[in-house]
Amino acid sequence: EAQNAAAASSQNAPPQGGSFTGQTAAEGDDAYSRKIIYHANLSMQVENYADTETRVQEAVKRSGGYVLQFNESTSASEKSGTFVIKVPANGFQSLLVELEKINPSMRKSMEGQDVTEEYVDLSSRLKAKQLVESRLISFMEKATKADELVAFSSELGKVQEEIERIKGRMRYLEQNVSYSTIDLRIAQKIGSAEAIGAQERGPLAKRASAALQGSLTVLNVVLQGIVVVLAGALPILVLLVIVAIPLWWVRRRRKAKLASVRQRLAEENKTE
């Protein structure tokens, strides 16, 4: 009965909402603002990564926002950084304009999620659960039996847990309505500003000399390695020679004897 009464009272209540700026309309107004969560994805291809990053940070500060997350990476082909920016909803559009001034050719996409209906439903459910909570507390105060008190206490715990869950979801929606999100990626291809640094490495002859010196250094290291390997294998080679010479000598004597026997047989055959 308590839940039905709360649901009926919530149906008569005016809807709640938030405008593009995240502000909620006052009760009694004829036109109610919507609660909308705004999210933008931006991508910039720039010539100077460091300068662009500094300008982005300054623009975010001026808008009253903050960088929630930042990651930077460098590969063989580019240097890039990704930002997750939170900005007050009333400064969302102005920050987009500032970022577009930094890089007019940036790619962008925006979307809005209307959570007005969910927020109103959560508000109604919260009122109903709070009414049930009050009724259960009242029953507990009047309970005279231990089993009734335990039953009411158990049910009250479940209701209060549901109330906290609803409040948490409502806070999440309110925060995301009040603060919009911008995902921004900045990338600089290696070879634009980096090419200027390459010119400072010196003339061709100097770079060729440095390359030759590097090759000679590598060759010297390789030769040293070969010498070290041979030095380590020398005892084994000496042992192999010591074993191989007697074997060679014995094999040679056998061949000589065999040749002598064959020659003798041949001479005997001729005599006959």
Image: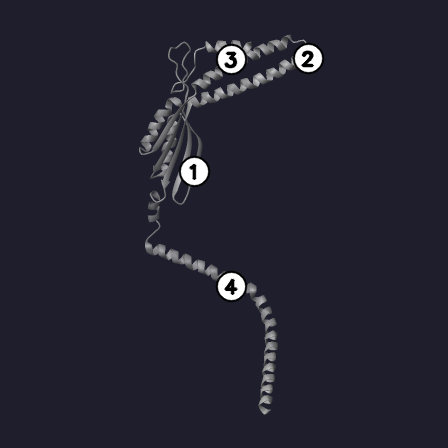
Q: Residue furthest right?
A: 146
Q: Nearer the viewer, mark 4 or mark 2?
A: 2
> Which residue bears the numbered disc 4?
227
Q: Amino acid at mark 1?
A: Glu
> Rounded to the nearest whole Å, what is the CA distance between mark 1 and mark 4?
46 Å
Is there CB contact under 8 Å for labels 1 and 2?
A: no
Q: Which residue is mark 2?
A: 146
Residue under pointer 3: 127
How much space separates mark 1 and mark 3, taking CA atoms? 46 Å
Instruction: Look at label 2 and name its amino acid.
Output: Ala
Three-letter amino acid code at the position of disc 4? Val
Kindly report the distance in space between the C-alpha atoms of the residues bearing marks 2 and 3.
Answer: 29 Å
- Which residue is at 48% across, 11% downward? 10
Please, what secondary structure does the residue beneath circle 4 have?
helix
**Among the 4 quarters of the image, the one containing residue 256:** bottom right
Is 64 drawn above or below residue 190 in the view shown?
Answer: above
Q: Quadrant of the N terminus?
A: top right
Q: Does residue 240 sit above or below 138 in this rendering?
A: below
Residue 82: % across, % down: 41, 35
**Disc 2 element:** helix
Q: Position of residue 119 (x, y in %)?
A: 46, 18
* Residue at screen point 41% across, 58% down: 215
Query: In the image, which is nearer the foreground, mark 1 or mark 2?
Result: 2
Which badge, 1 or 3, comes first in the chain's sequence?
1
Mark 1 touches mark 3? (CB < 8 Å): no
Report x, y in % for residue 102: 33, 32
- Give percent across and percent down for residue 133: 57, 13
- Mark before the other along the chain sequence, 2 or 3: 3
The crowding category of the residue bearing disc 4, from other C-alpha atoms within 10 Å (few below 14, some 14 to 19, many at least 20), is few
Rendered image quadrant of residue 60 = top left
Vertical placement of residue 155 versus 62, above or below: above
Q: Where is the C terminus found, in terms of image quarters?
A: bottom right
